[in-house]
Amino acid sequence: MTRVGLVGYGSAGRTFHAPLITAAGLDLVAVTTASPERVAQVRSDHPSALVVPDLAALLEVPDLDLVVVASPTGVHVEQARQVAEAGRAAVVDKPLAVDASGALEVCDVFAHEGAALTVFQNRRYDREFRTVQAVLASGDLGPIVRAELRWERWRPVPKDRWRENATAEQGGGLLLDLFSHLVDQAVLLFGPVTTVYAELAAHTTTAEDTAFLSCRHTSGVISHLGATTVAAAPGPRVRLLGERAAYVLAAQHDEETAFTEFLPQDGGHAGWLVRGDTREQVPVQPGEPADFYREVAVALASTDPQAAMPVDPRDAIHVLAVLDAARVSAAAGRVVEVITPGVVP
């Protein structure tokens, strides 16, 4: 069984990583937290797990196969470096760093130390996203006219967390949080991004709580990516406009949406194929986020763990290069070329 140490037991560690690690059949043997409240939560949720105060203590736990870094984004580079220098394989929560240069630094130190690294992109494994991929692969839509991916919420009073209270330089804000998923998915669907135009605003939080990106991909497709926490009428999550048909996904999981007429009629479908006044439901594709950790375990048991990892960590460098360019674009009010560090033009 793959022995896992988890760094952090806040929102990411407790809500996402720990449940998925155990659901995938991996052994959560140690968790770091210095908060008495979270120590009690770990002992209640995972009684067999050792609780240690910090990463240094975690790296002293014997026979750890994997360290999962689920701490605030602003300390990812520093903590990932410690894990690499200890020779341990790592999963780092998205985003890998606060900018592309930091992500390149992390990738380079793991390569130098010969330790395996991957990035937690759990949304690649959602059934709905797998369905979007299948719809595109089917060719039913024809050439894509425009792709729209949204992640909108109605949260006019923000949560009191580091993500809402931190500056962008510290890893706060919606651009680093939700767009790490949106850009990653857009790149998987349509290829790398060459240019970006962006609009950013902060209405309720320290860093941005509203953002829009128009991305031109190497395939020629233009994707419009939007997210906000002040949408009283959220959605639709995905709208792909093709020359022959459109695909509309109102929401994922239990998300709210104003486009209730496009909600699935049963659990076997996700989204609708629409041709004007006719529509048909699309069968949902299999997948679940725990598959990410199952694939990590398989990779660690392989002869080349880095090559077998489910997410190439250098994908995260390009995603962050897009977000870096988006900040420049928003400040300057113009289209900006995306330059990914470590990639030869």
Image: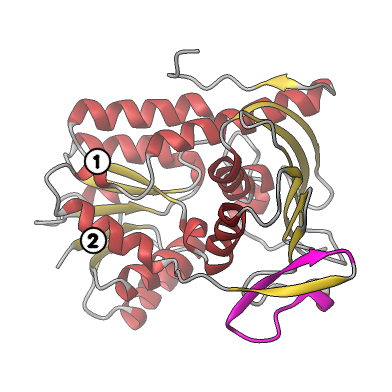
In the picture, measured across the screen, residue 319 lies left or right of residue 273, that is left
Q: Position of residue 91 (x, y in %)?
A: 34, 50
Region rendered in magenta = 261-276
- Label 1: element kind: helix
- Label 2: element kind: strand
Q: Position of residue 161 (x, y in %)?
A: 61, 58
Q: Position of residue 246 (x, y in %)?
A: 77, 58
Q: Which residue is mark 2?
A: 4
Q: Nearer the viewer, residue 298 or 177?
A: 298
Q: Give the numbered dot on residue 175.
A: none
Q: Amino acid at mark 1?
A: Gln
Residue mark closest to the camera, 1 vs 2: 1
Q: Which residue is mark 1?
A: 306
Q: Nearer the viewer, residue 94 or 208?
A: 94
Q: Residues within 10 Å of mark 2 (few under 14, many from 20)?
A: many
Q: Amino acid at mark 2?
A: Val
